[in-house]
Image (cartoon, helix red, strand yellow):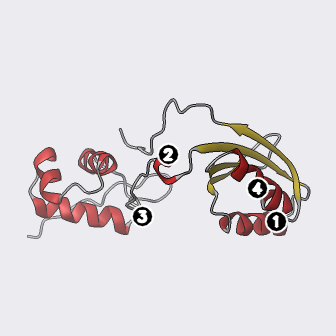
Amino acid sequence: MPKIVAPKEQNATGNASLDKMDLAILKLLQQNARITVKEIAAEVHLSTTPVHERIKRLEQSGVITQYATLVDKNKVDRALMVICYVSLKEHSKNAGVKFIKAIHELNEVIECYNISGEFDFMLKVACADMNSYYDFHVNKLSQMDNMGNVQSVFVMGVIKETHQLVW
């Protein structure tokens, strides 16, 4: 008689739940995306084949969205970090879509969040120095259609910066 296997539990979003082994693998990959399957297998006490299969499943299901290299901002001439709070003049769907498309064209903007409260968006902007930020603000950001208020907050020091969502 064939073995009956219960399907994996689904969470509220309909995605397969992650078990402890998936989380252990994700934790290792977050710490070092170049870690080999063999090294992961040794850490989590599985053979390489199931580890490889789990990683492929995590990629295919969209849990793992990208492998990236973290770069020292000081060594690539992007030492000035600025948080910009932006409010738009008009709040129609079309105006929001147009703003978002324009933001994607600005290399200086490395993160953008749609937020609630007094402002509509929060941007994380990376520039070489104050002069380059001034140029960005005056000649790019402020020239965008529908731009309302912009408040710039300059990062004085980084206390914690991580991209690890599994711990």
**Which mark identifies residue 74?**
2
The image quarter containing residue 104 is bottom right
Please give left or right for residue 11 compared with residue 23 in the image.
right
- 160, 64: nearer the viewer: 160
Mark nearer the N terminus (2 vs 4): 2
The amino acid type, in three-letter code, at marker 3 is Gly
Camera-side mark, 3 or 4: 4
Q: Quadrant of the C terminus?
A: top left
Amino acid under disc 2? Asn
Closer to viewer: mark 2 or mark 3: 2
How far separated are the C-alphas under marks 2 and 3? 32 Å
Query: Which amino acid type corresponds to the residue marked 1 in the rendered image?
Result: Lys
The furthest residue to the right: 89
Calculate the distance from the C-alpha at mark 4 to the C-alpha at mark 1.
29 Å
- Identify the element where label 3 is drawn: loop
Q: Residue 165 appears at what percent x and percent y?
A: 42, 44
Which disc, if any, is residue 93?
1
Estimate how packed mark 3 is, as few (under 14), some (14 to 19) or many (20 or more) residues with alpha carbons within 10 Å: few
Disc 2 to disc 1, C-alpha distance: 38 Å
Across and down, in percent, residue 117 comes to: 79, 40
Mark 2 element type? helix
- Asked whether the beta carbons under mark 4 and mark 1 sit within 8 Å of each other, the answer is no
Question: Which x, y percent locates residue 144?
Answer: 83, 63
Position of 65 compared to 131: left or right? Answer: left
Sequence-wise, the earlier of marks 1 and 3 is 3
Residue under label 4: 135
Q: Which residue corresponds to the image point at 25% horizontal and 50% vertical from the top-left?
A: 25
Few, some or many residues within 10 Å of mark 1 (<14, 14–19, 20+): few
Pointer 2 or 3: first along the chain = 3
Looking at the rendered structure, the secondary structure element under dot 1 is: helix
